[in-house]
Image (tube, helix red, strand yellow):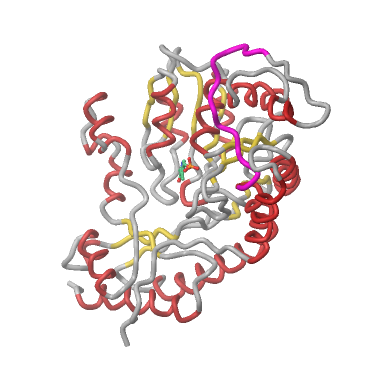
Amino acid sequence: MPRAEFLPFARPVIGEEEIAEVVDTLRSGWITTGPKTKSFEGAFKEFLGAPGALALNSCTAGLHTALVTLGVGPGDEVITTPMTFAASVNVIEHVGARPVLVDVEEDTLNIDPVAIEAAVTSRTKVILPVHYAGHPVELDAVFEIAKTHGLAVLEDAAHALPAKYNGRTIGSGSNPAAFSFYATKNLTTGEGGMLTGNPEFLERARVVSLHGMSRDAWKRYAKGGSWFYEVIEPGYKYNMTDIQAALGLWQLRRLGDFQERRRAIVAAYNSAFGQHRTFEVPTERENVEHAWHLYVLRLNLEAITVDRDRFIDELAKRNIGASVHFIPIHLHPFYRDKYGFAPGDFPVAHKNYKRIVSLPLHPGLSEADVSHVIEAVTDVADTFSR
Ligand SMILES: *Cc1c(COP(=O)(O)O)cnc(C)c1O
């Protein structure tokens, strides 16, 4: 029986505790960066085992702040992946540096360390890997290249909460890593982000992220705070509010349950699609723990008479929302035209772009929702079987 109501691709799970904590913040008289942001930073740092954490108003802000703090600017190159959201690459443009895209690995669609090595020049400053869909990048190989050539590694960990690589939690290292708390992410504060890394780096990043003001400027209206501050560089306005942190504190407490539910849904999808000739299910390598932000199903286009776009339209007709992650960076007009990219320049990214479909994967999905997704996806494949 077809589903009566549309199932959205993503939907946040917000509990009564989050709502009460936001109301408490609103009544407290302190609504922007303050005690709750500080406590969220502490809880997040502890959760990951990170050396430090800086709460910001987005992951994009975290990536930008990190590049500025690393001193990246005009003439510098940053190596990254085309299989990402535009924000990962836009921030490289914001600091005036050149994004150098390299292709991805066939199984994980993560940046290929062999391709990174081949792209290093005397101008390379940073490697910016993205843990695509929540599957960790081959970090040992990335750090080896970074060490050899004296490069910084800035991880885009927007999808990787929580994930592990060779037993190490993503974001627990001393290099900077940026997390996202956007509405669709594994933990949400509506909009928000966190930069992790070593405390000295984050102290400088904190100044960059708040107008370039020295000292803990947010304290200046609290008792014992001083009116005095000095601007030591033209910084940005990227601080998290206590209203956001109020959500984050409870979302973090729920994260374990969220992840358990995500894994159960992934298991159901894998067992439904794993043996079907039309599908290739996502990889989880032996040495990682996947954060399962996205469930990216790949279509064997030879097995069906429709393309991916039509496949998604057919799912929508069956009241199932789906999406595509991502339109590779080199296909977007700005990057295509500025750098003269052709679609086939990153063949693995391009070939897979044409056959990926992200299915709904969020902890609020009921058993019935999951069955509806499985029925609809299977029905489209069988209806248009070649
Ligand atoms: C969501 C996302 C971002 C941006 O996160 P914001 O918090 O919205 O700024 C960056 N990179 C990737 C890979 C993302 O998916």
**Residue at the right extreme of this rendering:** 224
In what quadrant of the picture does the C terminus appear? bottom left
- Look at the picture and state if 170 lies above or below 78: below
Q: What residue is at 28 percent from the left and 69 percent from the top?
A: 316
Q: Main secondary structure of the magenta part?
A: loop
Q: Is residue 269 left or right of residue 136?
A: left
- Look at the picture and state if 4 lies above or below 342: below
Q: Is residue 206 left or right of residue 158?
A: right
Residue 82 lies, in percent from the top left, at 36, 38
Based on the displayed image, in which of its 4 quarters is residue 250 positioned?
bottom right
Residue 49 lies, in percent from the top left, at 74, 43
Residue 186 lies, in percent from the top left, at 55, 55
Q: Does 353 lie within the magenta span?
A: no
Please state which of residues 28 and 137 is positioned toward the viewer in this rendering.
28
Q: What residue is at 60 percent from the left and 47 percent from the top?
A: 244
Based on the displayed image, in which of its 4 quarters is residue 114 positioned?
top left
- Look at the picture and state if 108 lies above or below 8: above
In what quadrant of the picture does the N terminus appear? bottom left
Q: What residue is at 26 percent from the left and 37 percent from the top?
A: 332
Residue 33 lies, in percent from the top left, at 66, 37
Residue interval drawn in magenta: 230-243
Q: Does 233 lie within the magenta span?
A: yes
